Amino acid sequence: MIGKDKIYVTKTFLPPQEEYSTILKEVFDSHWLTNRGKLALALEEKIKKKLNVRHMFLLNNGTIPIQIALKLFGNGGEIITTPFSYVATTSSIVWEGCTPVFVDIDPTYLSIDETKIQASITPRTKAILATHVYGNPCNVEAIAAIAKQHNIKVIYDAAHCFGVSYKGSSLFNYGDISTCSFHATKVFHTGEGGAIFCDSDDIFHHSYYAHNFGHDGPLSFHGLGVNGKISELQAAMGLSVLPYMDHILAERKRVVEAYDQMLNFNKIDRLAIRPGTDWNHSYYPIFFGSEEALLVAERHLNGHGIYPRRYFYPSLNTLPYVEYVKMPVSESIAKRVLCLPLHTALSTDQVTFICNTINDIV
Ligand SMILES: *Cc1c(COP(=O)(O)O)cnc(C)c1O
Protein backbone atom coordinates (compact mmCIF):
# COMPACT_ATOMS: atom_id res chain seq x y z
CA MET A 1 0.00 0.00 0.00
CA ILE A 2 1.54 3.29 -1.09
CA GLY A 3 1.97 5.67 1.80
CA LYS A 4 2.28 2.81 4.31
CA ASP A 5 5.72 1.46 3.43
CA LYS A 6 8.52 3.86 4.14
CA ILE A 7 10.33 5.02 1.03
CA TYR A 8 14.04 5.63 1.44
CA VAL A 9 16.41 7.47 -0.88
CA THR A 10 17.83 4.17 -2.05
CA LYS A 11 17.33 0.43 -1.79
CA THR A 12 20.32 -1.70 -2.70
CA PHE A 13 19.75 -3.93 -5.71
CA LEU A 14 20.30 -7.59 -4.84
CA PRO A 15 20.42 -10.46 -7.34
CA PRO A 16 18.48 -13.68 -6.65
CA GLN A 17 20.18 -15.18 -3.59
CA GLU A 18 20.90 -18.51 -5.28
CA GLU A 19 22.93 -16.74 -7.97
CA TYR A 20 25.12 -15.16 -5.32
CA SER A 21 25.35 -18.49 -3.46
CA THR A 22 26.43 -20.33 -6.60
CA ILE A 23 29.34 -17.95 -7.07
CA LEU A 24 30.13 -18.02 -3.34
CA LYS A 25 30.43 -21.80 -3.49
CA GLU A 26 33.73 -21.33 -5.35
CA VAL A 27 35.07 -19.51 -2.31
CA PHE A 28 33.97 -22.30 0.02
CA ASP A 29 35.49 -24.90 -2.30
CA SER A 30 38.81 -23.11 -2.72
CA HIS A 31 39.17 -21.59 0.78
CA TRP A 32 40.64 -18.55 -1.02
CA LEU A 33 39.02 -15.46 0.48
CA THR A 34 41.16 -12.54 -0.63
CA ASN A 35 44.56 -11.52 -2.05
CA ARG A 36 43.66 -11.12 -5.71
CA GLY A 37 41.55 -14.27 -5.95
CA LYS A 38 39.89 -15.77 -9.01
CA LEU A 39 36.63 -13.91 -8.47
CA ALA A 40 38.27 -10.49 -8.18
CA LEU A 41 40.26 -11.14 -11.35
CA ALA A 42 37.16 -12.35 -13.18
CA LEU A 43 35.17 -9.28 -12.12
CA GLU A 44 37.97 -6.97 -13.26
CA GLU A 45 38.06 -8.60 -16.69
CA LYS A 46 34.28 -8.30 -17.05
CA ILE A 47 34.20 -4.65 -16.00
CA LYS A 48 37.11 -3.70 -18.27
CA LYS A 49 35.40 -5.36 -21.20
CA LYS A 50 31.98 -3.90 -20.44
CA LEU A 51 33.28 -0.34 -20.07
CA ASN A 52 36.09 -0.54 -22.61
CA VAL A 53 38.75 0.85 -20.31
CA ARG A 54 42.47 0.12 -20.42
CA HIS A 55 43.64 -0.37 -16.82
CA MET A 56 41.39 -0.99 -13.87
CA PHE A 57 41.65 -2.82 -10.58
CA LEU A 58 39.29 -3.38 -7.69
CA LEU A 59 39.75 -2.06 -4.17
CA ASN A 60 38.03 -2.50 -0.81
CA ASN A 61 36.07 0.77 -0.99
CA GLY A 62 35.84 4.03 -2.92
CA THR A 63 37.89 6.17 -0.53
CA ILE A 64 41.20 4.25 -0.48
CA PRO A 65 41.59 4.79 -4.26
CA ILE A 66 41.32 8.56 -3.76
CA GLN A 67 43.90 8.38 -1.00
CA ILE A 68 46.23 6.27 -3.17
CA ALA A 69 45.92 8.73 -6.06
CA LEU A 70 46.72 11.61 -3.71
CA LYS A 71 49.66 9.68 -2.25
CA LEU A 72 51.05 9.24 -5.78
CA PHE A 73 50.49 12.79 -6.99
CA GLY A 74 49.92 15.01 -3.95
CA ASN A 75 53.29 14.97 -2.18
CA GLY A 76 51.99 17.13 0.66
CA GLY A 77 51.18 20.01 -1.67
CA GLU A 78 48.06 21.90 -2.64
CA ILE A 79 45.20 20.09 -4.31
CA ILE A 80 42.63 22.10 -6.21
CA THR A 81 39.22 20.64 -5.47
CA THR A 82 35.47 21.05 -5.47
CA PRO A 83 33.48 21.99 -2.37
CA PHE A 84 30.39 20.17 -3.69
CA SER A 85 30.85 16.42 -3.23
CA TYR A 86 30.68 13.74 -0.58
CA VAL A 87 33.01 14.40 2.37
CA ALA A 88 35.45 11.65 1.24
CA THR A 89 36.77 13.94 -1.51
CA THR A 90 38.01 16.57 0.95
CA SER A 91 38.79 14.31 3.90
CA SER A 92 41.13 12.24 1.70
CA ILE A 93 43.14 15.36 0.84
CA VAL A 94 43.57 16.30 4.48
CA TRP A 95 44.19 12.66 5.50
CA GLU A 96 47.06 12.48 3.00
CA GLY A 97 48.66 15.59 4.46
CA CYS A 98 47.82 17.78 1.48
CA THR A 99 46.02 21.13 1.51
CA PRO A 100 42.63 21.46 -0.18
CA VAL A 101 42.30 24.63 -2.27
CA PHE A 102 38.63 25.03 -3.05
CA VAL A 103 37.36 26.40 -6.33
CA ASP A 104 33.63 27.16 -6.51
CA ILE A 105 31.30 25.14 -8.74
CA ASP A 106 29.63 25.87 -12.04
CA PRO A 107 26.04 26.97 -11.26
CA THR A 108 24.61 24.87 -14.10
CA TYR A 109 26.43 21.53 -13.96
CA LEU A 110 27.54 21.76 -10.29
CA SER A 111 31.05 20.40 -10.92
CA ILE A 112 34.20 22.49 -10.36
CA ASP A 113 34.07 25.78 -12.32
CA GLU A 114 36.93 25.30 -14.78
CA THR A 115 37.07 29.05 -15.49
CA LYS A 116 38.12 29.67 -11.87
CA ILE A 117 40.85 27.01 -11.61
CA GLN A 118 43.66 28.99 -13.24
CA ALA A 119 43.55 31.76 -10.60
CA SER A 120 44.02 29.23 -7.78
CA ILE A 121 47.13 27.54 -9.14
CA THR A 122 50.37 28.27 -7.23
CA PRO A 123 53.87 26.77 -7.38
CA ARG A 124 52.70 24.32 -4.65
CA THR A 125 49.77 22.96 -6.71
CA LYS A 126 50.23 19.24 -7.41
CA ALA A 127 46.88 18.10 -8.74
CA ILE A 128 43.24 18.81 -9.38
CA LEU A 129 40.79 16.48 -7.60
CA ALA A 130 37.35 17.08 -9.06
CA THR A 131 34.10 15.15 -8.68
CA HIS A 132 31.74 14.27 -11.53
CA VAL A 133 28.96 14.95 -9.08
CA TYR A 134 25.75 12.91 -9.64
CA GLY A 135 27.55 11.28 -12.60
CA ASN A 136 27.50 14.62 -14.44
CA PRO A 137 30.88 15.09 -16.16
CA CYS A 138 33.21 17.97 -15.30
CA ASN A 139 34.46 20.01 -18.24
CA VAL A 140 37.13 17.38 -18.84
CA GLU A 141 38.61 19.03 -21.94
CA ALA A 142 39.18 22.40 -20.26
CA ILE A 143 40.58 20.74 -17.14
CA ALA A 144 42.98 18.60 -19.20
CA ALA A 145 44.26 21.72 -20.98
CA ILE A 146 44.87 23.60 -17.70
CA ALA A 147 46.62 20.58 -16.16
CA LYS A 148 48.87 20.18 -19.19
CA GLN A 149 49.78 23.86 -19.21
CA HIS A 150 50.79 23.79 -15.52
CA ASN A 151 52.18 20.25 -15.48
CA ILE A 152 49.84 19.04 -12.74
CA LYS A 153 47.84 15.81 -12.46
CA VAL A 154 44.08 15.31 -12.71
CA ILE A 155 42.24 12.93 -10.40
CA TYR A 156 38.52 12.42 -10.87
CA ASP A 157 36.39 11.26 -8.00
CA ALA A 158 34.06 9.33 -10.29
CA ALA A 159 32.26 7.55 -7.44
CA HIS A 160 28.89 8.16 -9.11
CA CYS A 161 29.91 7.32 -12.67
CA PHE A 162 29.56 3.60 -13.32
CA GLY A 163 27.86 3.32 -16.71
CA VAL A 164 28.34 6.98 -17.71
CA SER A 165 29.82 7.72 -21.13
CA TYR A 166 31.01 11.10 -22.31
CA LYS A 167 31.47 11.73 -26.04
CA GLY A 168 31.27 8.01 -26.70
CA SER A 169 33.84 6.84 -24.15
CA SER A 170 33.53 5.73 -20.52
CA LEU A 171 33.84 8.75 -18.24
CA PHE A 172 36.49 6.73 -16.36
CA ASN A 173 38.80 7.22 -19.36
CA TYR A 174 39.35 10.91 -18.50
CA GLY A 175 42.00 12.26 -16.13
CA ASP A 176 45.26 10.65 -14.95
CA ILE A 177 43.30 8.53 -12.46
CA SER A 178 39.57 8.06 -12.03
CA THR A 179 38.27 6.43 -8.88
CA CYS A 180 34.93 4.75 -8.36
CA SER A 181 32.92 3.53 -5.39
CA PHE A 182 31.03 0.25 -5.35
CA HIS A 183 29.37 0.98 -2.01
CA ALA A 184 25.91 -0.51 -1.50
CA THR A 185 24.27 2.86 -2.20
CA LYS A 186 25.94 3.28 -5.59
CA VAL A 187 24.63 2.31 -9.04
CA PHE A 188 26.84 -0.78 -9.24
CA HIS A 189 27.98 -2.31 -5.98
CA THR A 190 29.99 -5.03 -4.25
CA GLY A 191 28.59 -4.20 -0.79
CA GLU A 192 31.71 -2.18 -0.06
CA GLY A 193 34.19 -1.75 -2.87
CA GLY A 194 35.82 0.56 -5.33
CA ALA A 195 38.19 0.84 -8.25
CA ILE A 196 41.00 2.75 -9.86
CA PHE A 197 40.88 3.43 -13.60
CA CYS A 198 43.77 4.82 -15.60
CA ASP A 199 45.34 4.75 -19.03
CA SER A 200 49.05 5.00 -18.19
CA ASP A 201 51.01 1.76 -17.56
CA ASP A 202 53.24 3.59 -15.13
CA ILE A 203 50.40 5.01 -13.03
CA PHE A 204 48.70 1.62 -13.09
CA HIS A 205 51.79 -0.14 -11.72
CA HIS A 206 52.42 2.41 -8.98
CA SER A 207 48.81 2.52 -7.80
CA TYR A 208 48.42 -1.25 -8.10
CA TYR A 209 51.45 -1.96 -5.87
CA ALA A 210 50.33 0.74 -3.45
CA HIS A 211 47.01 -1.03 -2.84
CA ASN A 212 48.75 -4.29 -1.83
CA PHE A 213 51.29 -3.13 0.79
CA GLY A 214 53.76 -2.36 -2.00
CA HIS A 215 54.41 -6.09 -2.58
CA ASP A 216 55.84 -7.08 -5.92
CA GLY A 217 56.44 -10.66 -4.80
CA PRO A 218 56.06 -12.54 -1.52
CA LEU A 219 59.41 -11.29 -0.25
CA SER A 220 60.02 -8.04 -2.09
CA PHE A 221 58.55 -4.56 -2.12
CA HIS A 222 58.14 -2.07 -4.90
CA GLY A 223 57.45 0.85 -2.60
CA LEU A 224 55.19 2.15 0.13
CA GLY A 225 51.75 0.62 0.23
CA VAL A 226 48.54 0.20 2.15
CA ASN A 227 45.89 -2.53 2.29
CA GLY A 228 43.27 -1.64 -0.29
CA LYS A 229 42.48 -5.17 -1.48
CA ILE A 230 38.98 -6.31 -2.29
CA SER A 231 37.89 -9.67 -0.84
CA GLU A 232 36.45 -12.59 -2.78
CA LEU A 233 33.18 -12.19 -0.87
CA GLN A 234 32.82 -8.66 -2.26
CA ALA A 235 33.87 -9.79 -5.74
CA ALA A 236 31.22 -12.53 -5.62
CA MET A 237 28.57 -9.88 -4.95
CA GLY A 238 29.88 -7.82 -7.87
CA LEU A 239 29.85 -10.82 -10.20
CA SER A 240 26.24 -11.55 -9.30
CA VAL A 241 25.12 -7.91 -9.67
CA LEU A 242 26.97 -7.11 -12.91
CA PRO A 243 24.70 -9.17 -15.23
CA TYR A 244 21.80 -6.97 -14.06
CA MET A 245 23.45 -3.65 -14.94
CA ASP A 246 21.36 -3.04 -18.05
CA HIS A 247 18.22 -3.75 -16.02
CA ILE A 248 19.40 -1.48 -13.18
CA LEU A 249 20.16 1.40 -15.55
CA ALA A 250 16.86 1.00 -17.43
CA GLU A 251 14.82 0.97 -14.21
CA ARG A 252 16.58 4.07 -12.91
CA LYS A 253 15.88 5.82 -16.20
CA ARG A 254 12.20 4.92 -15.87
CA VAL A 255 12.06 6.53 -12.41
CA VAL A 256 13.92 9.67 -13.55
CA GLU A 257 11.61 10.12 -16.52
CA ALA A 258 8.58 9.75 -14.26
CA TYR A 259 9.92 12.48 -11.94
CA ASP A 260 10.66 14.70 -14.94
CA GLN A 261 7.10 14.28 -16.13
CA MET A 262 5.17 14.58 -12.87
CA LEU A 263 7.02 17.12 -10.73
CA ASN A 264 5.87 20.71 -10.86
CA PHE A 265 8.98 22.73 -11.77
CA ASN A 266 7.51 26.19 -11.11
CA LYS A 267 9.19 26.52 -7.71
CA ILE A 268 11.91 23.88 -7.91
CA ASP A 269 14.74 23.18 -10.35
CA ARG A 270 16.18 19.95 -11.66
CA LEU A 271 19.71 18.93 -12.65
CA ALA A 272 21.11 19.91 -16.06
CA ILE A 273 23.30 17.19 -17.60
CA ARG A 274 26.29 18.31 -19.69
CA PRO A 275 25.68 17.81 -23.43
CA GLY A 276 27.54 14.80 -24.85
CA THR A 277 26.77 12.67 -21.79
CA ASP A 278 25.12 9.26 -21.79
CA TRP A 279 24.06 9.47 -18.15
CA ASN A 280 23.45 6.65 -15.62
CA HIS A 281 20.53 8.29 -13.78
CA SER A 282 22.39 7.88 -10.51
CA TYR A 283 20.68 10.63 -8.49
CA TYR A 284 17.59 12.82 -8.66
CA PRO A 285 18.49 16.11 -6.97
CA ILE A 286 15.90 18.89 -6.80
CA PHE A 287 16.75 22.46 -5.85
CA PHE A 288 14.45 24.63 -3.74
CA GLY A 289 14.37 28.43 -3.70
CA SER A 290 15.69 28.53 -0.13
CA GLU A 291 16.82 26.25 2.70
CA GLU A 292 13.58 27.15 4.54
CA ALA A 293 11.54 25.83 1.60
CA LEU A 294 13.65 22.66 1.57
CA LEU A 295 13.15 22.05 5.29
CA VAL A 296 9.39 22.52 4.99
CA ALA A 297 9.25 20.07 2.10
CA GLU A 298 11.52 17.54 3.85
CA ARG A 299 9.32 17.59 6.96
CA HIS A 300 6.19 17.19 4.82
CA LEU A 301 7.75 14.25 2.93
CA ASN A 302 8.94 12.58 6.15
CA GLY A 303 5.38 12.92 7.47
CA HIS A 304 4.27 10.84 4.50
CA GLY A 305 6.93 8.16 5.04
CA ILE A 306 9.27 9.49 2.33
CA TYR A 307 12.93 9.95 3.26
CA PRO A 308 14.99 11.86 0.71
CA ARG A 309 18.58 12.81 1.60
CA ARG A 310 20.47 16.09 1.59
CA TYR A 311 23.16 14.96 -0.86
CA PHE A 312 25.45 16.91 -0.61
CA TYR A 313 25.37 18.96 2.55
CA PRO A 314 27.30 20.72 3.95
CA SER A 315 29.44 22.49 1.37
CA LEU A 316 32.88 20.99 2.05
CA ASN A 317 34.67 24.34 2.45
CA THR A 318 32.74 24.69 5.74
CA LEU A 319 34.16 21.49 7.30
CA PRO A 320 35.73 22.11 10.72
CA TYR A 321 39.18 20.87 9.63
CA VAL A 322 39.69 23.05 6.55
CA GLU A 323 40.41 26.75 6.26
CA TYR A 324 37.13 28.46 5.40
CA VAL A 325 37.04 30.42 2.17
CA LYS A 326 33.64 31.56 0.95
CA MET A 327 32.19 29.51 -1.95
CA PRO A 328 28.89 31.26 -2.70
CA VAL A 329 27.56 28.90 -5.38
CA SER A 330 28.39 25.67 -3.59
CA GLU A 331 27.12 26.92 -0.23
CA SER A 332 23.86 28.06 -1.77
CA ILE A 333 23.31 24.79 -3.69
CA ALA A 334 24.24 22.60 -0.71
CA LYS A 335 21.60 24.33 1.43
CA ARG A 336 18.85 23.94 -1.18
CA VAL A 337 19.37 20.46 -2.64
CA LEU A 338 17.42 17.33 -1.79
CA CYS A 339 17.93 13.98 -3.52
CA LEU A 340 14.70 12.12 -4.09
CA PRO A 341 14.31 8.34 -3.75
CA LEU A 342 15.74 6.61 -6.80
CA HIS A 343 16.25 2.86 -7.16
CA THR A 344 15.14 -0.12 -9.21
CA ALA A 345 12.44 -1.25 -6.77
CA LEU A 346 10.60 2.10 -6.80
CA SER A 347 7.26 1.60 -8.55
CA THR A 348 5.82 4.25 -10.84
CA ASP A 349 2.89 4.49 -8.39
CA GLN A 350 5.32 5.31 -5.62
CA VAL A 351 6.97 7.98 -7.80
CA THR A 352 3.51 9.44 -8.45
CA PHE A 353 2.88 9.49 -4.70
CA ILE A 354 6.23 11.25 -4.06
CA CYS A 355 5.56 13.82 -6.81
CA ASN A 356 2.05 14.57 -5.53
CA THR A 357 3.40 14.98 -2.00
CA ILE A 358 6.03 17.46 -3.24
CA ASN A 359 3.69 19.30 -5.58
CA ASP A 360 1.24 19.75 -2.65
CA ILE A 361 3.77 21.68 -0.64
CA VAL A 362 5.72 23.81 -3.16
C1 LIG B 1 30.42 7.27 -2.04
C2 LIG B 1 31.43 8.32 -2.36
C3 LIG B 1 32.78 8.19 -2.01
C4 LIG B 1 33.29 7.14 -1.08
O1 LIG B 1 33.08 5.87 -1.47
P1 LIG B 1 33.10 4.68 -0.40
O2 LIG B 1 33.03 3.47 -1.27
O3 LIG B 1 31.91 4.85 0.49
O4 LIG B 1 34.39 4.77 0.35
C5 LIG B 1 33.68 9.14 -2.47
N1 LIG B 1 33.27 10.19 -3.18
C6 LIG B 1 31.98 10.38 -3.50
C7 LIG B 1 31.60 11.57 -4.34
C8 LIG B 1 31.01 9.47 -3.08
O5 LIG B 1 29.72 9.69 -3.35
Image: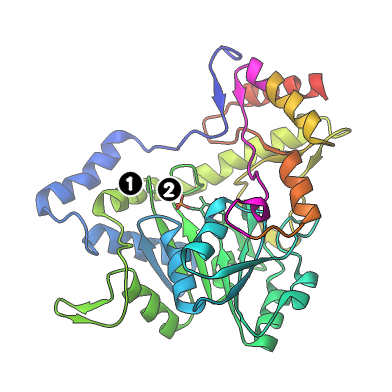
Magenta stretch, overall SS: loop
Front residue of 227/252: it is: 227
Q: Is residue 219 above or below residue 112?
A: below
Q: What residue is rendered at 28% in x and 41% in y?
A: 20
Give the CA separation, mark 1 to mark 2.
8 Å
Residue found at x 41% / y 50% = 242
Q: Answer whether residue 279 is visible to the viewer in this image.
A: no
Which stretch is magenta? 301-322
Query: Furthest-right residue in view?
Result: 266
Quarter of image, res 294: top right
Position of residue 292 relative to residue 40, above or below, is above
Q: In the image, residue 355 lies at what x, y percent?
A: 73, 25
Residue 205 spot, x, y in % from top left: 36, 80
Q: Quadrant of the N terminus?
A: top right
Where the C terminus falls, by quadrant? Answer: top right
Secondary structure found at label 2: loop
Label 1 element class: helix
Q: Identify the amino acid type marked 2.
A: His
Say which residue appears at 56% left-offset and 52% top-offset: 87
Give the residue at x 70% y 88%: 149
What colour scheme was applied to this rendering of the protein? rainbow
**x and y, in percent, of residue 60 in the image:** 35, 56
In depth, the one of 203 and 265 nearer the eye is 203
- Kindly identify which residue carries mark 2: 189
Residue type at mark 1?
Met
Q: Can you identify the residue that label 1 sits on?
A: 237
Is residue 154 highlighted in magenta? no
Residue 91 can be seen, yes or no: yes
Looking at the image, which is closer to me, 254 or 186?
A: 186
